[in-house]
Amino acid sequence: MRGVAAAAQADGRSFESIYRDHVGRIFARFLRFADTRREAEDLTQETFVRAFKSLDSFRGESALSTWLERIAINVAAETMRSAAMRRLWIESVEDPAASASAVATSPEGGAAQDVRRALASLPKGARAVLLLHDVEGYRHDEIAELLAVTAGTSKSQLHRARKLFKEALER
Amino acid sequence: MSTHVREDDLHDYADGELTSAAREPIDRHLAACPICHEALESIRRLRARLAELPSSVEPERDLLAVILARVGADASSAAAATGAAGVASAGRTDPVRDSALEPGAAHESPRSREESVTGGGKAKRENAGTGRGERSSVPTEARRLRTRALRSLRASYAIAAAILFFCAGAAIFFPRSPATPDAASVAPGAAPRTPEIAGAYAGEIGALVQALDTRRTTLRPETVRIIEDNLKIIDDAIARSQVALEEDPSSADLAQLLSFAYETKLELLRRATEISN
């Protein structure tokens, strides 16, 4: 065992270095999408597992951070495309318990805490569209493909999400 | 335009999704209507508020160990399934298979709308279709990074394999466990198959799971979570080894790998039960 451990040590621990350099940004992104920190952790794990298993497809044409962030969006989108999540598209009632859970354990305070609380109060589908469009910079046709909905649904969800987000911030 | 701008149109205007012909009357109206002007500014302020969320947050738990264990387990079972020596290609997936993942990728025309508040969505698609596999075109830095990282994976895999070997070795050289498949139940010269191996461990594993279940409340939630996470990893390794063995039932190596995985599960359950006592 000592020899194996020494070999890992001598290798420079590239995986660890990649993880340490990027986990903060990936986890921060999932904290916005997820209902709970645990869910954000699970999505973060999944992103790095996929990345480490596919490093040989990374061709260095973009920054490693960009590549990782795209994998993260893919992971988030897959979760949102699941059958259970699809039902949320037509639900307008939030889950106060889940929202409270996400906000109660969020590390930041002040303005960011208010934003996170308002975001967490949105129905998950509307929240996803708001984040993908206004934070990640995706267009409605792209969001439609990611989430397996129509572009019209994406647009109407965005307008609704902004309205709910504004109301929640003013509360 | 004498009436106020429709709300949907204001959103589209703010997002730069209107043609110049559609924008023109709205421009004129906004210049003269403080109510609509304020509504537009309100939409823009909302987008700005989203930028207040931190761009980096460290998770409270260190996730690296579980991530490496999962990568190692997948590499292990994939290598076992294919008989391939190289770990580098094991468990390979295409993490960016969906073309819609790159913001703006669906269209050639430049985006005309206002920039996203965070500057997100500027990524260019890595690994887009035809370029894959053209190793000669891979920049040196990327090759170096991949090589180092894959060496690291091999090292992690080696550690995982060493742990498995230790557990299994203990069972082979110190046959204290009644769970080892009974040689008499397996035809001479034949490798034990999936049901035989699973059956050999089922009794003790079942009893330990039951014992652990009854004592679950005596453990801290964090401990329970770690145990469950580890069991999930091992169960995944068992499932993959089973599939590989069913595809190649004559392989003694695969049978041994499956036994190793069961032995690891047994060891974890024993330790967890001891802790809960």
Image: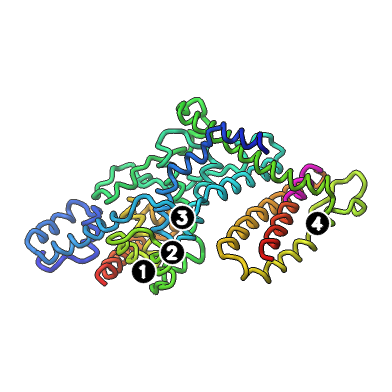
From the image, tell me which residue sits under label 3.
Answer: B60
What percent of the width, then of the height, locates residue A157? 34, 64
In front of the other: A71 or A156: A71
Kind of residue at badge 2 = Asp
State left or right for residue A6 relative to residue B246. left
Q: Secondary structure at mark 4?
A: helix
Q: Which residues are magenta?
A: B252-261
Asked if the magenta segment contains residue B274, the reply would be: no
From the image, tell me which residue sits under label 4.
Answer: B195
- How far is mark 2 from mark 4, CA to CA? 40 Å
The crowd level at tag 2 (other Cα within 10 Å; few <14, some 14-19, many 20+) is many
- How far is mark 3 from mark 4, CA to CA? 41 Å
Kind of residue at badge 4 = Pro
In front of the other: A13 or B21: A13
Q: Chain of mark 3?
A: B
Residue A151 in sight in this render:
no
